Amino acid sequence: MKVGILSGGGDAPGINAVIRAVVRKGIEYYGYEIVGIRDGWRGLLEGEFVPLDLKAVSGILPRGGSILGTSRTNPFKHEKGAEEILKNSEKADMEAVVVIGGEDTLGVAYKMSELGLKCVGVPKTIDNDLAGTEYTFGFRTAVAIVTETLDRLHTTAEAHHRVIILEVMGRYTGWIALEAGLAGGADVILIPEKPFDLNEVCKYIKHRQEKGRNFSIIVVAEGAKPKGKAEIIYGERVDEFGHVRFGGVGYYLGKEIERHMGIETRVIVLGHVQRGGSPTAYDRILATRYGVAAIDLVHEGTFGCMVALKGSKIVPVLLKDVAGKRKTVDLELYDIANIFFG
Ligand code: F6P
């Protein structure tokens, strides 16, 4: 049997660990032929494949990025895109496809499943905003990178008596900001789920000054917005899934804080550093478990599913129940973080 594998959307540390697991178990235990699909759904749309043997996946476990490449291609935005995909997978004798992706890529997997493509999804995104699973792989690595950054920013902010704002990824949810902010001792955490009030942010900084703490660290998710206002976006261009590019809320805040309080404020936008490089041990293990579970589902003939983490187990959930749903932050956790604000 021939099984295809693709990675779509923004990359996340651990994609290669999934690919390795699918190839190793698929070939060594089930005798399958595994075919890599280039750049997410684009590769199936245009019939661009690469054979994946044991040698091709040797040494890739700790590597970031994706050996297959990735893209934000939405086949449903291309004329006859879905038909092309069915035609190309049939022509290549691909009986099943393992789809590594976030909400967009897996949303396509769901629609393609309904049209007859046999798909198994693997939940990937540093944002951790996918419904149906407790954690997506890549998230923990991003949190570790942001936490280390916060530790570093603390020492310099303290030495210079500055406010430092760290803008992190998270378009619609503040998982990275919240967990890294909690781990890194941020004085204020701003997330998309809770529009912020500038006066309140200033109050926290002032409260710290009153306690003799003349520096503050603020973590803000890129999708956080001031109360009653829209998100701050980088440009009007949208991708094939209709997403605009966020970015700039950190600078907005920095200017406002300086204007209101007269404190020197510096802004750091961490960007793709959060997604690049090697996955942590946790993400390598989670990604490997996901990959093994995905190829096991293919072997069982269970399709239209995504592998998911529930408690300590990896279980299948229906793509139908995941598609179009978003997992927002745990507000109880936000309340805990809030204890340490100001
Ligand atoms: O979806 C994951 C994510 O990292 C978001 O947090 C971020 O807004 C987006 O991808 C950035 O995507 P790109 O690298 O395509 O600009």
Image (spheres, helix red, strand yellow):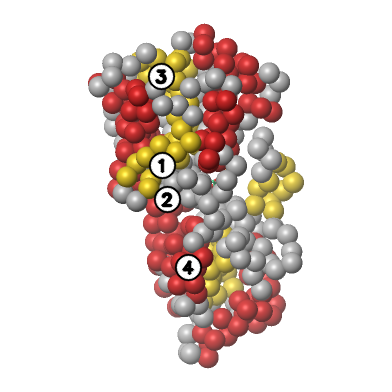
Q: Point out the frontmost of discs 4 and 3.
A: 4
Asked if marks 4 and 2 touch (Cβ < 8 Å), the reply is no
Q: CA distance from mark 3 to mark 2?
A: 27 Å
Task: Judge whether 333 appears above or below 20 on screen.
Answer: below
Of residues 333 and 43, which is closer to you in this image? 333
Dot 2 or dot 1, earlier in sequence: 2
Q: Secondary structure at mark 1?
A: strand
Dot 3 or dot 1, earlier in sequence: 3
* Amino acid type at mark 4: Glu
Residue 132 horizontal/vertical position (percent): 47, 45
Q: Secondary structure at mark 3?
A: strand
Quadrant in which the N terminus appears: top left
Residue 167 horizontal/vertical position (percent): 56, 60
| Residue occupying image coordinates x 64% and y 70% | 196
Task: Judge whether 106 appears above or below 309 on screen.
Answer: above
Q: Secondary structure at mark 4?
A: helix
Instruction: Report if residue 239 is visible in the image.
Output: yes
Which residue corresponds to mark 1?
A: 308
Few, some or many C-alpha atoms within 10 Å of disc 4 (few <14, some 14-19, many ≥20)? Answer: few
Asked if marks 2 and 1 touch (Cβ < 8 Å), the reply is yes
Of residues 76 and 168, which is closer to you in this image? 76
Checking the image for residue 134, the label placed there is 2
Which residue corresponds to mark 3?
A: 3
Residue 81 horizontal/vertical position (percent): 65, 21
* Amino acid type at mark 2: Glu
Q: CA distance from mark 1 to mark 4?
A: 22 Å
Which residue corresponds to mark 4?
A: 332
